[in-house]
Image: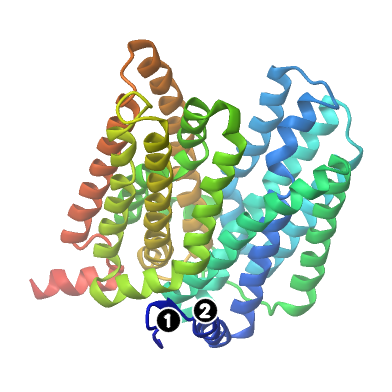
Amino acid sequence: MDSLYHGDRPDWGVAMRGFVTEFRSFGWPSRLLMINQFGINLGFYLLMPYLAGYLAGPLGLAAWAIGLVLGVRNFSQQGMFIVGGTLADRIGYKQLIVGGCLLRTAGFGLLVFADSLPALLIASATTGFAGALFNPAVRAYLAADAVDRRVEAFALFNVFYQGGILAGPLVGLALMAVDFRVGAAVAAAIFAVLTVAQLFALPQRNSTPTTEGASILGDWRTVLGNRSFMLFAGAMVGSYVLSFQVYLAIPLQAKHLAPESESALVAGVFVISGLVAVIGQLKITRWFAQRWGPGRSLVVGVAILTVAFLPLAALPDANRAGRIAAVGALLVGAAILAIGSAAVFPFEMDTVVSLAGGRLVGTHYGFYNTIVGVGILAGNLATGTLMQTAAAMATPALTWVVLIAVGAAAATALYWLDRAGRLQPPVSRMSVGTAT
């Protein structure tokens, strides 16, 4: 890639041309899936960050009801990934992508009119299950279309993914100034456009099942019997617990440090995270790929996620060096967390396909997302409890120290899996065993 610098100043024109060249080097299906993911996240994040406020404000729901609505949405996605991945392998990737976008169109459309708890629960379950349908299918389709360029494809995919997360809340903020229902209608319209685009422009692509005529339970036994894959998924739970603290511990820390400007500080965290991915993803991936293989890159990436919590452990409150220093530590930690996430994601997605041996890829992605989803739920519950305990014991660094320990354990587990050859494709492991 051409240098991005002339003298001491970055040449953003060169960077943009490099990005466009990279994007155009992929086939039409991959490019469409990347644009589709930007649209998915744009439509989702322009609405969902403001849903709790809408439920509590204009609709006047009780706190337990708000928690129920949000919990149903999360469970109907995280808990149903296995179903979505299995259907993707059995019915076809395109059908699940189109069906998921159509279902989310209906879910967001229902939010325009829903004003009772039953209707809101149906809308939430619909939007969640829609994500369970298209998420594994999109990743499996992209992996199949990119062939031997999967790492590069997932790196570029993450640029569009994070771009949607960055743009969504900003667009939503403007729409919420008018009315929540206007935002819901716009989100539904975005998914309607995506549905039509995938239906008519995305070529058909199906997976190759492990055994002709095998049952669904047989497919699931195949995945559960893939010991290397299951060990990898278990090790990556720690990585997800760390990366998802951008939604829990870091916002709570922002509220603790700057209660009067919490929203601005949280927005700054998300802007930093989004910009790191949008601007730096391709360079980070290329830098890692040139120095290490996928296994070592995962280990180093998770180690970077772990390091992100060191500034927070060193300056957990304003007592040690003042509030400005503590806020600076929070923003530095968020930036390092974003770098680690950008480093991990492409190699993580590629490793899932490798360990699947190229078969039942959608089902493997479904199981993977469900496993880490359960881990995120447990990790968030534990982190929230830990933060309360730390406050009660007047030990503000406790939460961050425990998270560092979680990251160190995850990085160590990945290191030993890589050393044992467990992160290599099945054929490669057989070859190593035969040679030995």
**On the image, which quarter does residue 1 sit in?**
bottom left
Q: Residue at x 43, y 77 (%)?
A: 9
Q: Is residue 89 among the parts visible in the rendering?
A: no
**On the image, which quarter does residue 398 sit in?**
top left
Which quarter shows the C terminus? Answer: bottom left
Badges 2 and 1: C-beta atoms under 8 Å apart?
yes
Q: Earlier in the sequence, mark 2 or mark 1?
A: 1
**On the image, which quarter does residue 135 sit in?**
bottom right
Furthest-right residue in this view: 113
How many C-alpha atoms fall within 10 Å of the one at disc 2: few (<14), some, or many (≥20)?
few
Which secondary structure lies at badge 2?
helix
Q: Position of residue 430 (x, y in %)?
A: 21, 70
Furthest-left residue in this view: 436
- Disc 2 marks a residue whose amino acid type is Trp
* Side of 216 where 185 appears, left or right: right
Residue matched to label 2: 12
Q: Position of residue 242 (x, y in %)?
A: 39, 42
Looking at the image, residue 123 lies above or below residue 396: below
* Side of 164 where 345 appears, left or right: left
Q: Position of residue 82 (x, y in %)?
A: 55, 49
Q: Residue at x 45, y 67 (%)?
A: 281
Image mark for residue 24:
none
Residue matched to label 1: 4
